[in-house]
Amino acid sequence: MAIGKQSPFKMFGFRRRQEQEDATADFQDQIKSYKNLNVGKNTYKGYKNVYEGAQNVYADAKNVYEGMDNPFEELKVDTTGAELGGAQFAQSQADTLAALGGGVGGSGFGALTSTMGRQAAQQAAATQSNIAGQVNRNEMARATGAANIQSAERAGAAAQQQMILGGEERLQGLVLGGEDQAQQMRFAGADQGFNRNITKQQELLGMAAGRKTAADQARAANTQMWMGLAGDAIGAVGSIFAGAGTAGGGSPTLGPLMDPPSLPPVSLFPG
């Protein structure tokens, strides 16, 4: 018996056979896709050293203390006091001699002259010391003030330069650091995406393999079932023929009513 061009045996196994063919095709496609994966791809290819072009912001730094003047090197030994003291002493001696003239005897005149000369010399020395001390103190104060001003100016220039260059250094660090972080994030994202794609393909391949295994097992079980049914049917037919022959005492036959109809070739094991 046949339904159309499809035998009943093949009709009952069609769904399993079709599933097995579809599962096998899907499995082959997944294997092909997995083989085409470039698992050796370097996702970090093209990674750049963003610090390669970093500049030394201190390269043009200047020594602000270079060329400082030494205000103390111009200090001089003041001779004004000495000169004034000498002039006072000479003038005192001249005035003494002129005032006394010849009114004093030789020995008295010599003693008086000596005394007055010592007095004049002491007075001149005192005057000299006083003037020289004032001049020296003034010069020292001027040199000290100039040195302090110069030191303050150079220290201010050094602090200003440090602030400018330090700011440039920090700005450069922020710019390059941000660029490096962004680059790391881009490449890490690409690497993660690549790994996810591999994982996805592996999962698809595993699912296809599982589907194929299930389809193969179902087809095998169906084939085994039909083989069992066919064996049982053949055994039953054999028993009928054997019983009929024994009862009639001749060759076994079922008569024209039991002759099988003309059937097209049929596969007994469609699976």
Image (cartoon, rainbow, N blue to C red):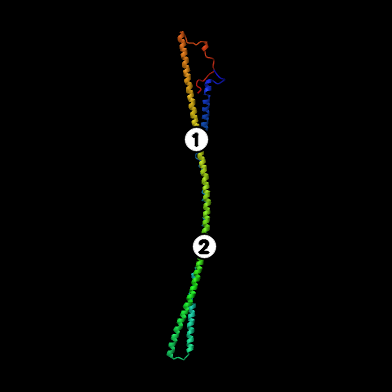
Is residue 68 visible from the viewing direction of this image?
Answer: no
Q: Mark 1 belongs to which amino acid?
A: Glu
**Earlier sequence position, callout 1 versus callout 2:** 2
Return the residue nearer the eye: 53 or 172: 172
Is the residue 130 above or below the residue 256 in the image?
A: below
| Front position in the image: 25 or 255 | 255
Report helix, strand or loop for mark 1.
helix
Provide the residue designation for mark 1: 203
Q: Residues within 10 Å of mark 2 (few under 14, many from 20)?
A: few
Q: Position of residue 180 (x, y in %)?
A: 52, 48
Q: Residue at x 49, y 71 (%)?
A: 141
Q: Where is 235 relative to 97, above or below? A: above
- Does the image show residue 126? yes
For the N terminus, give its image quadrant. top right
Would you place residue 135 above or below residue 47 in this image?
A: below
Numbered-mark total: 2
- What residue did someone put label 2 on? 156
| Tag 2 secondary structure | helix
Crowd rating for badge 1 (residues with CA inside 10 Å; few <14, some 14–19, many 20+):
few
CB atoms of marks 1 and 2 within 8 Å: no
Residue 254 percent location from the top left of the image: 50, 11
Please tell me whether residue 74 is drawn above or below residue 202 in the rendered image: below
